[in-house]
Image (cartoon, grey):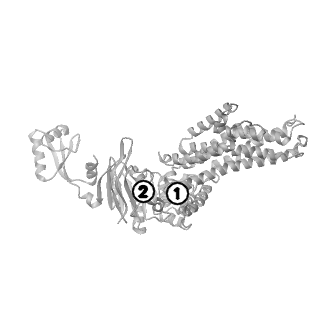
Amino acid sequence: MYSLSTSQLTFAFGDHRAGDGVSLSVPEGGIYGFLGPNGAGKTTTIRLLLGLLPPQSGHISLFGQPLQADPLAAYGRIGALIEMPSLYNPLSGRANLEITRRLYGAPRSRIDQVLALVDMAHAADKRVKQYSLGMKQRLGLANALLNDPDMLILDEPTNGLDPSGIRDIRDLLIRINREEGKTIFISSHLLAEMNKLATHVGIINQGRLIFEGTLDQLHSQSGNHVLIETENATEAKLALEQHAFTVSHCNGHHLHVPVENKDQVAHVNQALVTKGLPVYSLRMQQDDLEDVFLSLTQ
Amino acid sequence: MSALSFQLPRALSVEVRKYRRTLAFWLALLSPLFLVLLNFMIYWLRETPMVTPEENAWESYGTMNINPSVFLLFPMFVTLLAVFFFQIEHQNHSWKHLWVLPVARSQQYLAKVIILLTLVASSLVLFTLLIWGTGNLLSVLRPELGFQEDTGMLAVGKMILWSGAASFALVAFQFWFSFRWRSILLPLALGFAGLVSANIIISWEHSIWHPYTAPMLALATAQGGGENLPISPIVYSLTVGIGIFVLAYFEGKNRILRG
């Protein structure tokens, strides 16, 4: 069962395709990490999902219903935090929540519940302009939780936060997912963060969804590479390319060369030695998630 | 329809909560005070009486307050008010949050229209009350001016009501400009350009088609002039204003999400 799914979603700003046939499926109860480099189309996709941009083609389905059929009913079941939290700085945290609460028609008691949930009860009566960015993000999350939504849609909620702020938001989201049973769709360009948080991952690059699956499936995409230290990496690169190897990284004295097995490692060594290039060290490694991400997005 | 009718009171209560004690609120409250207090001081303190024996004190005092207001201060007030009114949303990046809440965007927009018109109307009511109150005070402080003889407030009230009603299109245009642009410069520049151009062309026979002249022409009509106008400035302003409010919603509702 999917809380959110899209089919062939397309949107372009002039010639730039920010969404190019995006078909994604967010399983109910999961944390879906929507990954991609800056400018890949994450925010545009989120704006499409929320009906803030009209798709040029494709369909969006929220809780099994087309978004366009009854957007207000869909908005009643989601909470969203898009880029910077939308808060009225001259007002207190509580007054901000009261504004959103009235628009949701949620019970008054819900304000104290969400303040406790995001651990902001102590600062509720301070003006928002006195808040740190981390506090604003937590209040933004409280705002998104006021209607007790089935799903949260969050666009880079850890942007600009320090490591401790990032950890606080991560712990909070895990708690909201596990204890409150909310499905979470979260965009980020921080792979390590999604590795700690997400159950499912979608990777977007240049407007196209290039991977979708569980975190384990992403890990299983990883291969091996050999890390070489030599006198002159540029010459070594040329030598290896003559033997049909691909060099993924080349920097000063070091090269990364993707390989499939140990025989290829020996072949790499032989190619360099035959060319008269000294090999100081040669180590076979498994790609980490970053390598997988880079190989998918570059 | 029933769902929508529940949404408007919700949206209105939020707008009232949001604008309490903001810059827009104080501007609406304090602007009428500025002009009326200035004229009150002149009428009270000037040695040579401001009212000649053949003049009606209330009409003289009313005109001294209303003319500079209609020809200069009121359009500036509306321009500034609309800018302050929308900056609270633009500065806090609120549109993307408001537009994904389960209250129709049209209802939230309508609530904003109603609240801005209420602020303008409240300011005009306060302006009228201040003229009446200070006029009565002058009847005590400077009895020789003749304020106690004939209230004359009906004529003053008519001038304010007519010019106020005819400012509907002006309010609608400035609402649109401040709604659609995050920048404060463009609405301010257009507001002042509208005001200056209206003052320049006011004596031209086709000036009525410039919506910013409508309050001036309506004031002239209330003062007994304004003959040969092809259409009532109030009717023209209300018609154009309604059209602009509708157009502004469809033109601006997606545009405001940019940036």
Q: Position of residue A16 (x, y in %)?
A: 36, 42
Q: Is residue B93 visible?
A: yes
Q: CA distance from mark 2 to mark 1?
A: 22 Å
Which amino acid type is marked by label 1? Ala
Secondary-structure class at tag 1? loop
Closer to the camera, A232 or A296?
A296
Which element carries disc 2, helix, strand or loop? strand
Q: Find residue A163 and report its horizontal and vertical position in percent.
A: 40, 54
* Kind of residue indicated by mark 2: Leu
- Circle 1 residue: B104
Q: Residue at x 73, y 49 (%)?
A: B125
Which chain is mark 2 on?
A
Q: Are marks 2 and 1 in contact (CB under 8 Å)?
A: no
**Which residue does the image show at 46% across and 59% down from the upper left?**
A71
Tell me residue B79's x, y (percent). 63, 41
Quadrant the N terminus of chain B occupies: bottom right
